[in-house]
Image (cartoon, helix red, strand yellow):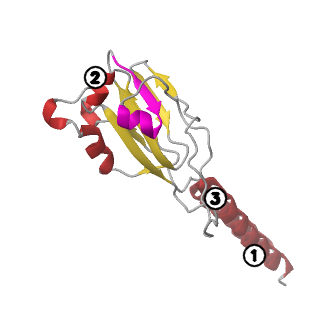
Amino acid sequence: MKNSNMASFLGHFCAVLLLIMVMATINTPVGASKEFEVGNGVGWRQPRVNETELYNHWAARRRFHVGDSLRFEYKNDSVLVVDKWGYYHCNTSNPISVFSDGNTVINLDRPGSIYFISGDPDHCNNGQRLVVEVITLHPISHTPHSIASPPQPYSAMSPGPSTHSSSGESVSVTMVSALMAHIATYVTLLLLSP
């Protein structure tokens, strides 16, 4: 009898230990955020004469998702978040946000086009401007809208790390819940068996 109880105890102990290890690996968010250094080693600066599309070529080679962030490193300049009109006309008079700390991190917290320009209109006219297309990791809705809604201005810019939770957390909670149900069933079957 003692060996049977010890074997049962060890079996339960191993099952609980396995559960803990699985939960630790599942609780990792599915879609990890990335921080992109704008311009890579070039930083945020006025492009030379032959590189006026520097920043848009840089952006075209990357995929930006909701939750990612952009790091702008610069000296004696600034970063302005503007609307589409401000971007195409290098208009600094009505920015959505202004940053001038030399090391700005901007969270991409919504899908769509986001426009950035230098605070110096001459720099912007010479190519120091950037548009990024931000996409979601998962579609929000699968049903088409019957009436198109107008684009909303981007006013939720916030420097620093994002505090929004990723969809990976909800996936983790669902998977852990399913795993817990399976383990509860297994333990119940073990306890009820002769």
Q: CA distance from mark 1 to mark 3?
A: 21 Å
Q: Which residue is labeled 2 in the image?
A: 122
Label at residue 172: 3
Q: Which residue is labeled 1 in the image?
A: 186
Q: In the drawing, does residue 17 fall left or right of residue 137?
A: right
Which of the two discs, 1 and 3, sits closer to the camera? 3
Of the residues under marks 2 and 3, which one precedes in the sequence? 2
* 191 or 56, nearer to the observer: 56
Looking at the rendered structure, the secondary structure element under dot 1 is helix
Q: CA distance from mark 2 to mark 1?
A: 70 Å
Which of the two discs, 2 and 3, sits closer to the camera? 2
Is residue 4 in view from this perspective? no
For the residues labelled 1 and 3, say whether their Cβ atoms are less than 8 Å apart: no
Of the residues under marks 1 and 3, which one precedes in the sequence? 3
Extreme left residue here?
50
Q: In the drawing, does residue 149 fall left or right of residue 159?
A: right
- Tell me the crowding category of disc 3: few under 14, some 14 to 19, or many 20 or more residues within 10 angstroms, Cα based: some
Q: Is residue 73 positioned above or below 138 on the image?
A: above
Residue that appears at 52% across and 50% down: 111
Point out residue 186 in the picture as x, y percentages from the top left corner: 75, 75
Point out residue 101 in the picture as x, y percentages from the top left corner: 43, 18
Mark 2 residue type = Asp
* 68 or 190, nearer to the observer: 68
Instruction: Write down the region rendered in magenta.
Output: 77-89
Which of the two discs, 2 and 1, sits closer to the camera? 2
* 41 or 54, nearer to the observer: 54
- Tell me the crowding category of disc 2: few under 14, some 14 to 19, or many 20 or more residues within 10 angstroms, Cα based: few
Answer whether residue 78 is magenta in the image: yes
Mark 3 residue type = Ser
Is residue 175 in view from this perspective? yes
